[in-house]
Amino acid sequence: MAKPRTYVLVPIDTNTVTAGAREVKNAISAEIGKRGLSDEITVVETAAFGPTDAGVLVAVQPDNVVYANITVANVAEIVEEHFVKGRQCKKFILAGEKPVLPKAGETDSRKLQELGRIVLDNCGVIDPENIKEYIARDGYFALGKTVTELKPEEVIKVMKDSGLRGRGGAGFPTGLKWSFCAPVKSKEKYVICNADEGEPGTFKDRLIMEGDPHKVIEGMTICGYAIGGNKGFIYIRGEYKLSIQRLQKAISDAREYGFLGKKIFGSTFSFDIEIKIGAGAYVCGEETALIESMEGKRGLPRLKPPFPAQCGFRGKPTNVNNVETLANVPPIIRNGADWFKKFGTAGTPGTKVYTVLGHINRPGLIEVPTGVTLREVIYGYGGGMKSGKFHFAQLGGTAGDILGEEMLDVPLDYDAMQKNGHVLGSGAILIVNDSVDIKDFLYSCMKFFVHESCGNCNPCRNGLKIIKDITQRLKEKKGYEDDIDGMEEISMILKSSAFCPLGQSPAEPIMSALRYFKEEIKQGIDSKAVKPTIRHTQRDLITLAPV
Amino acid sequence: MTVSEIVDRRGNNRENLLQILHDIQDSSGDNSIHRDAIEELAKIMDITVADITGTLSFYTMFSTKPRGRHIIRLCESPPCYIMGSENILDALQKKLGVKLGETTPDKKFTLEPSSCLGTCGVAPAMMIDDEVYGNLNAKKVSEIIDSISKSGGN
Ligand SMILES: Cc1cc2nc3c(=O)[nH]c(=O)nc-3n(C[C@H](O)[C@H](O)[C@H](O)COP(=O)(O)O)c2cc1C
Ligand code: SF4
């Protein structure tokens, strides 16, 4: 067979499937077959590589052309024009700046990494359901190196030296976390991949799992070797059907190739992975609640310490990491800590995957070095505001901070954010224009928290409801004179006394919104509104009611 | 599948409870977990009825109330909210003639609110059974419902 000269890449993911991506892919294959071009042109199913708002995408490589919003009806025309006549079909080409497209058939992944993609270097390039394509791009090389050349301590040392910090939200140093679990003596230890991803606006983990499931599996297996565990679990939300399906396929292929199972690469190390499916509860993303849920119980957070590293799943030492964190592991082991540190800032080396959404021209997935600014994200990668003027951004999901215009030029990394009193969070960047009232937005945030509170502790269960009621009054311009003070007070009580971070975190959006938009929030106060006399103050409600 | 078959397949172990409940719900015919199934499960797994009920009520994907054949889950989280999910809610309620949380009289659809579905790239979005529908507007919503109704789907 002739070596194919052209690749047609069709991303098949949750968004494009409903837009008809499978049908388009089949139509392209059929059309190419009909014209006798099958030997020269290969049609490949891949996963999302960036834009999420442009219907079915069709990328042609090496021509570096991306067609957008393609339907079956357009296929014949595109094939005729592009492949037979050799002219690009201008009217279907993706509007705006082109996403950075990795080249298909490009086997030198280092080149791609120079482009700044560490985690997503395979997404949208390989067929995620074909293990051979992953292997062809250095896949499982890091695992082989780990189990045949490195001691567990050495793996942990590389991870520590790399400076990788957890991408699940808190930014805890990964190597350090592994080093807590490794020395604990136990016959059984577990590696858990946290794929619960419930933070509104965050769907990077889904796209990583859909686009490059083997990378997550390889990362988990290396982690298992480093901490001395033989069993891994991926706890994934029940809604992520395509991710579940692709991970399942990837696990069984990896077993078949000997990358999972007994005596991996002829070493004495054995490891296997099982998928656990969640049932819809945001709080289960918190690592101890996740463990409870994995044990078949209500997902109530546990008291810490003991931390999972000592006493986790089944009471055994357990290491919990986010999907993106684990996906960073194979490239780090393969290329070394120094290589990794070349990316991003000193405090948070590497890249960060963000989902950028809201009122911008090009919502979607980006991977950028840590330290780029919000302005660059909005006006560079996001293509600018779609309509209206920039009003505020929310960073890291609903539990994240609301930032005003003043913050547009602060570098996005854990330390710089912290210095400014903010948190970087999970990787969602929501851009909102001036058509949205901040009070209305806060109300929507609080509605989310009230719904997701697990109800176990009193401050969160009652306090959130009080704040939600206040935001509702403010949004309806019926706020009482002291509502803003009340909101502030209750947020701070929550921050200091809620049992788990879910109850503590609503203080982030509330306090940051008050910092930048106090005047706008004050407009929700109605000076004539009469506050009903109540027996208890709001504070009493939280602090006196039985737990 | 009967309850005991499901337990056999998944393994009679507390850790598998969520998966077992998923399976029971999927094979119930009305997308819910019936009281008698819970009682049977309690006996087989030696867990109290209260414990099982407490566990399943914790998770939004489970229901003890009979639901329609198709479950519509509309995202209400902030990213969809700013893109107009309230209008979509209005459109759905009007089209189906039911309120949030209710089932249509013909038992075809149940309309439920949902937290983020992880499809914010195409906000406002909803999920019907396992499919995601994004970039919604009132017209699109109406067409989607019509096409599912017509296909008489199961
Ligand atoms: C309410 C709540 C929800 C969370 N949701 C997630 C989640 O969906 N995914 C995740 O990786 N971490 C989530 N976390 C953070 C985890 O508890 C934990 O810190 C993380 O999985 C550790 O992984 P990392 O060190 O790789 O970041 C959540 C935390 C809280 C308090
Ligand atoms: S803070 Fe909220 S979510 Fe956390 S344990 Fe308390 S009630 Fe549950």
Image: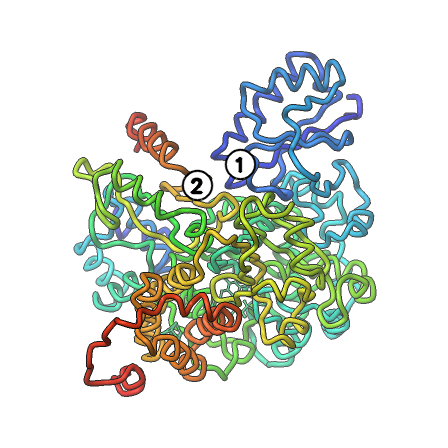
Q: Position of residue A466 (x, y in %)?
A: 31, 73
Could you classify mark 2 by the number of other residues whose Cα lies within 10 Å: few (under 14), some (14-19), or many (20 or more)?
many
Chain of the residue where label 1 is placed in the rendered structure: A
Q: Secondary structure at mark 2?
A: strand
- Which quarter of the image is occupied by the C terminus of chain A? bottom left
Residue B132, label in figure: 2
Could you classify mark 1 by the number of other residues whose Cα lies within 10 Å: few (under 14), some (14-19), or many (20 or more)?
many
Q: Position of residue A403 (x, y in %)?
A: 56, 65
Q: CA distance from mark 1 to mark 2?
A: 9 Å
The residue at the point 52 percent across, 76 percent down is A308
The answer to whether one can see residue A87 in this image is yes
Three-letter residue code for mark 1: Thr
Q: Which residue is mark 1?
A: A16
The residue at the point 75 percent across, 26 percent down is A6
Q: Secondary structure at mark 1?
A: helix
Q: Position of residue B132 (x, y in %)?
A: 43, 41
Chain of the residue where label 2 is placed in the rendered structure: B
The residue at the point 24 percent across, 52 percent down is B33
Which corner quadrant of the image does residue A156 belong to? bottom right
Colour basis: rainbow
